[in-house]
Image (cartoon, rainbow, N blue to C red):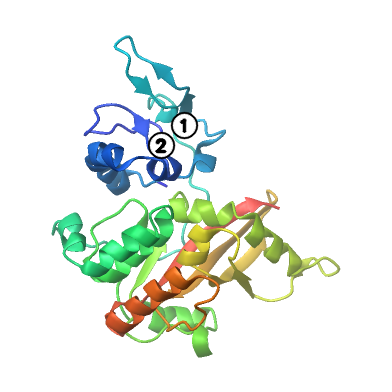
Amino acid sequence: MAKLRGFFNQILKNNRIFTAEDIGEMSSKEFGENEKAIDYQTGTLGIPYRRDLQDNDDVEFVSGYTRADGTQVKAHYRAKSDSVANPAPIHNAPTGFATGVQNSYQADFSSFLKSNPLVNINMHENKNYPNAQEMANIYLVKPENVPKSNEYNYIAPNYGFEHLNGKYSLTGNKSIPKDWPGIVYNGNSSMSKNISNSQEMQNQIRAQFDNYNNRFSKDKLDISFTQDPNLHRSIAHGTILEPKIDSEGYFTGYLYDKYDFDFMKDYASNPKLTAANNLFALLGLGSNRNYYTIAPVKFKW
């Protein structure tokens, strides 16, 4: 998530922040009226969950009320003025990623996505899951063609193959294939915050800590997301690289995953999602759209 304090929506001409839940609760009419403002926020700030904004000093909650003309205003969050310095990022990407290649692609991203019929499937199936929707859109447009973002950096092909496989001993199905680009999220991104706040992931990481020897049992920790649909659709299964507990009592690491579409056979558990996944796999557009992702993780140990 980009900087919250001082955010101003140039479409609405105010400091309201839309959450994923706000958007999911909108009628078709409401969404149409707010679509441009939502697109603006998506491109500049991202779309947080309500839980991301609770107890956040950069925002304030506004209770619902009725204006003098009878207009109903729903409860919402808004950004505070930028009079106080923004806190430091949670945990940034490893050295070399923070200065990774940024795209200069200037095409109309929204128009490009709307021209792809698979986008409609993605938008429908992931309408309440912003991180999953974002990652699928990156796949559809091809990672090298996504516009600049405050949420992530684009890493040029071959870097992962030439540098990361050896550094992290990534072998077998964990290894990064040659010519794959990367998308590396920053510590304040919605993706990193949602992953860091996952109790399911935290429990899995704690279970892999050797209390007797006061260290992690492995240098790479396998984790799975099954309880949070947004993270299940975004990551599903990932690997925590460089797990450690810092001097201030925080766990830090980097969640690594490969984003591609394998053909799924389990229609019984979620037939709609499986069907959508298999459309991506079959129509898909091929391996030249695959990419790896890395997201910094930090939580109180």
Residue 107, image x, y percentages: 13, 59
From the viewer's perspective, tell me whether residue 149 is left or right of residue 230. Answer: left
| Mark 1 neighbour density, 10 Å: few (under 14) some (14–19) many (20 or more) | many
The three-letter amino acid code for the residue at tag 1 is: Asp
The three-letter amino acid code for the residue at tag 2 is: Leu
Q: Where, by quadrant of the figure, is residue 20 drawn?
A: top left
Label disc, if present, on residue 142 of the rendered structure:
none
Between residue 261 and residue 282, name the one nearer to us: 282
Q: Are marks 1 and 2 in contact (CB under 8 Å)?
A: yes
Q: To which residue does mark 2 refer?
A: 4
Residue 116 in the image: above or below residue 9: below
Query: Circle 2 — which element?
Result: loop
- In the image, what residue occupies the spot 41% across and 37% down? 4
Residue 215 in the image: above or below residue 33: below
Q: Earlier in the sequence, mark 1 or mark 2?
A: 2
Say if residue 101 shows up in the picture: no
What's the CA distance linking mark 1 and mark 2?
6 Å
- In the image, what residue occupies the spot 23% across and 62% down? 103
Residue 37 in the image: above or below residue 247: above
| Mark 2 neighbour density, 10 Å: few (under 14) some (14–19) many (20 or more) | many
From the viewer's perspective, tell me whether residue 199 is left or right of residue 173. Answer: right
Residue 65 in the image: above or below residue 255: above
- In the image, what residue occupies the spot 21% across and 34% down? 11
- In the image, what residue occupies the spot 68% across and 48% down? 248
Q: In the orientation shown, which residue stands out farthest toward the bottom? A: 172
Residue 124, image x, y percentages: 34, 59
Label disc, if present, on residue 58 of the rendered structure:
1
